[in-house]
Image (spheres, rainbow, N blue to C red):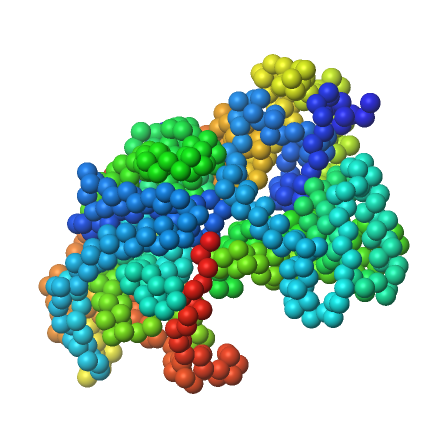
Amino acid sequence: MSLLTSLARLRALEEGIAQPIATVRHCHLSERPMVLIPLRMSGEAAAPLAAMLGTRRDDPRLLVVTQPRNRDLRFAWTADLAAELLPYIGSFLAGTETVERKNADPYERVLDAPQILVPNQAGIAFVRLLGRSTRFRRADGPYPVPETVPLLGRWLTYFGERAAHPGSSLMTAATEELGRHWASGQSGLEDANLAALMAWITTGPSDDAEDPLVWPPAGPATDPGFDAEVLATAIEAGAAERITEALRGQLEPTWRLMWQAVDLLRGLPEGASVEQRWEQDRGSFSAMAAHIAEGAPPQARRDGAVAAASRLARMERAQAAYEVQRAYDDPLVMAEYRLTGEAFAGEVVETEPEHSEGEGRSRKLRPLVVVKTDDPVRLAPGTALGTPQRRAQGAQLVEARDGLVTVKITKGMGRGKTPAPGSVPEVGERVCYTSLTDDFQGSPALPEAEATPWTHGGPPREYTPSDEDALEEWS
Amino acid sequence: MNRLDALRGTTPPKPHDARAIAALAANPGCARRALLDGAGIDKDATARHLGFPAPFGQSPFAITRGNAFEALVKADGCAELLRMLRELLELPVAEVAYHDVENVGAHLRHAHTRALFDRAARDEHDSGTIYDHPLLGLEIAGHVAYLEPDVVAFQLGGRFHIVEIKSFAVIDGQADPAAVAAAARQAAVYVLALRRMLRELGHDPLRVAHDVVLVCPENFANRPVATLVDVRRQLAVLERQLSRMTGLDRLVEGLPEELTFDLLPGEDGLPTRPAAELADALRRTTARYAPDCLSTCDLCFFCRDEARQEGACDLLGRQVRDELGGVASVEEALGLADGTRAPAEGQEEIARLLRNAERLRRECLA
């Protein structure tokens, strides 16, 4: 958290309403998102109790395990979940585009991808565990389950893992996205409560948000009081109808909140780089679909050494790119870097568009721009700069003194003797320059999995599905 | 009457559990909590009486599952536990004696635990013993707190291991990091208590291993799996915090003579003390609220309410507080940001940053 966000939190506390910390939306929002609110049986690692889900706010589907200790009912529930989610996922696979690549074969990428919205981080973790507990099951063999169950398990695992990828919007938690755009007047810990965070953003803080009788928890954990007083007696009595209705009552308030959260986020204009990140999501989703279609085995329980290293490198690159893109897309995010002196903004007071360096054939056009700024610039002469106003442009800091910064443009002004029209900012224009640049970073050279050195455990064993996996207890 | 007993008054004392001590060490600067815990006051009942009941409760399903799992591990004289210890510690455990200290009357239990451990530490050739529910004591700020004995200690050849049985799952070798961290902190409390007891008895305290045995259900089943968890770091933190903790005596000295947190329980055990009076009494002690209290302290909602009324930056979390270094109240921080308040000595830098931040926010949101 930056000082800018801290200040917004203080202001929120004073004014009694959350304050914006972004001027554009930094996540993709699907036209047809799948809102999913899972509930877990208390005390169990990944035993489902219920879920409310659907793509339309007026048409939620409620799935309930009416006897949570019954393994068969649990698998039946998972099959019901698959019957809802798999057609939704599948509906995006029909429309594709061919993407040409340098040095590689072209591939098919879906035109649009699914998006699953859950209330909070714990919801994402639960989806991942649900995936883990179902992806190794088998439709044949000693303990058969419907064949959609392991398939769903693989997709849930995929979405759960992708949710950890910085900037991905395939599966995302409402509290996380809201928290990226608004600062409430409570702590980050309390922001994990969807009802509390929504109250801060919409009407102002309310202690009702923490009262499970007014706002039941957004899951996956249920309210212990509800468990003791309602659920336990209903399960004891074996009253399926009562259980279903009780759980509907626990889920419906969160269902309404989730769609309200969607409305709030939709109200923000989309950031310029969101489309690009969504394109990567579409590519990743297409690759997963192709993987399944080719009959590849379920994801391993744990990554091998090479797979883990390359996943980590991918995530680091994505994180760096996400941070830079957000700053370029959003002046309020860029302001954090202006505060620390890594960026500055101001008005152009002087230009020398035809300034050049070198003589004769090595003569190069290097337009100079002087910017007047109130920001504390902490950049050394020679630092490479980029600017959100002209993303293709490259520049270099020449000198910063007394609120006047001289910048030399080094890239993106054409090859002629005079700069291309519009490529050099005019006097009076407001510009922003920053040392943050989203430079392409190559992936690290890693050996093939089969060549994993002994220091890293040697080549990982190939996965062969076994009856033992399929039989794994699920109590 | 001892001053601490006077603070508790007629309300029966509440024993500590390792969880409470681990939490106490997490917020050592909180004088209110130190006093209440030192006096053995039932914070849960206090919070409820004040109208700020603690937000924790445990689902009956979780309790049932936890108990069933513990029973499974301890069944047949801890047979399952023994099998795991044998594999994990690579020890040639042939036969093991089983002592359940719980069978001894409560007031004798601590003395009995001491005697048992003393004997085991003397007898190097002992074949191995499992102690269930040993009652250990730990001195906190000058007063001995007795720990709820929901733990098992294992001894072989004069070496001791603390065994913690928890019902959160270990899935593919990974468990919820927060749950493991909490278990490690608690286990460290037991390790420390056992080490101090051995030292008092004249034995080498390092005979208690710093590797504790954590027993959890594996994957999605009820089958237990044991893992060694190194708690050296937690031990170091705990020892440092305990030694740093302001001596309770000094805290008590600063309080008015007549101050008491007595709930004045009636014949039915329900508190009869006017809640407003109790709240006033509590406000005479200084709390140090942080949002982390919401998951560890029964009085959290009371202290949060107090922090709200004071407009303290603590409400927003440690990170915000640290970032505002030295500016304690919301009003003060916003005054510095707006430039309506002159920075005090030492606040020049943060005031400059806040003013800059305010300028940038206004510019971007205009």
Q: What is the quadrant of the N terminus of chain B in the image?
A: top right
The answer to whether residue A430 is visible is: no
Q: Residue at x 48, y 34 (%)?
A: A228
Q: Position of residue A377 (x, y in %)?
A: 38, 55
Q: Position of residue B76 (x, y in %)?
A: 68, 55
Q: Position of residue A38 (x, y in %)?
A: 35, 46
Q: What is the quadrant of the C terminus of chain B in the image?
A: top left
> Up-down: is A152 above or below B243?
below
Q: Residue furthest left?
A: A421
Is A31 situated left or right of B315 in this image? Answer: left
Is A353 situated left or right of A154 in this image? Answer: left
| B90 vs B202, nearest the viewer | B90
> Up-down: is B191 above or below A413?
above
Is A189 situated left or right of A323 in this image? Answer: right
Task: Using the rendered view, name the quadrant where residue B282 is placed.
Answer: top right
The answer to whether residue A233 is visible is: yes
Task: Using the rendered view, name the quadrant where residue B357 is placed.
Answer: top left
Q: Residue at x 75, y 39 (%)?
A: B145
Q: Residue at x 67, y 22 (%)?
A: B261
